[in-house]
Image (cartoon, grey):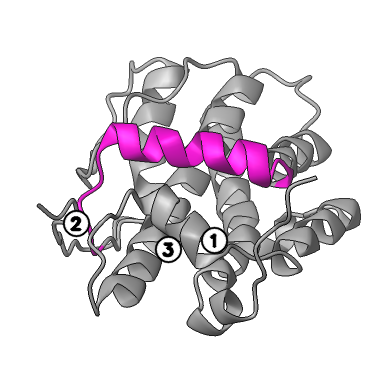
Amino acid sequence: MSIFSRSFQKSARIWSRDRSNFEVPDVVMEELEKISESCLTFEEHKKLANDTENDADQLYRVLHFNEELLKAATEIIGFTELRAVLGFSPPKPWTNSNEIKSRVPANATIEQYYNANESRHRNGILRYSLEDKQVSSAVKFLDKRFPVIRDAYTKSYKHNWDGKKKIDRKIVDYMLDLYDTVYDSIEFRIYDLTRRSKIEECKPKKDT
């Protein structure tokens, strides 16, 4: 039985109002280049996707699935680190829901305000329905193979906000827009890992 059930969804993500207000540190951009300089073998991709169906469509299926899976994992890492910086609770288990709360009560706590607005920054264009255990496994994979992703978020957040001001709605909006900026810096590098040409040029690592 295939683990890949397609679920086309409308994007819930909004775009930053003014990206010029944010800065991804040069050292972070240099570290992110390590992703572009790396590659994953097809065997690594199959293991990541947990795909055991050895058929003619396997390469296409696995690469497209992993593109979505790694984007979701990158998203969770970014939100986890942002919540930690702001002093909020960790993200809830992954769901494929793109529900957006259009109104936030005036008396909502600042964390409730954040929770309501985080969904607006999710990358909702998913072709596959993902399970929380799949996304959690991908997060562990990225932390081990590309720890620079988590570092990129953390360093960028701390570079742009010193944490000295009281957190209000304006700061939450600012930090969520900053999340978008960092995510975009990572996303195309993740896509590069799932290109067929990148797989074909990748050589298996030799055991040392």
Mark 3 or mark 2, which is nearer the start of the sequence?
2
Distance, label 2 to label 1, CA atoms, is 35 Å
Dot 1, how many residues are within 10 Å of its Cα: few (below 14), some (14-19), or many (20+)? few
- The mark lying in front, picked from 2 and 1, is 2
The amino acid sitting under disc 1 is: Arg
Can you give x and y, in whole percent of width and height, for residue 72 in the image?
41, 48
Identify the residue under disc 3: 67
Q: Is residue 116 above or below residue 193?
A: above
Give the camera-side residue of 199 and 30. Answer: 199
Question: Residue reaching furthest bottom?
Answer: 197
Q: Answer with left or right where residue 128 lies relative to residue 78.
A: left
Query: Which element type, helix, strand or loop, lies under badge 1?
Result: loop
What is the quadrant of residue 59 in the picture?
bottom left
- The mark lying in front, picked from 2 and 3, is 2
Question: Which residue: 49% across, 66% down?
Answer: 42
Predominant secondary structure in magenta?
helix
Q: Answer with left or right where residue 45 lies relative to residue 92.
A: right
Residue 130 belongs to magenta span: yes
Identify the residue under disc 2: 4
Query: Which element type, helix, strand or loop, lies under badge 3?
Result: helix
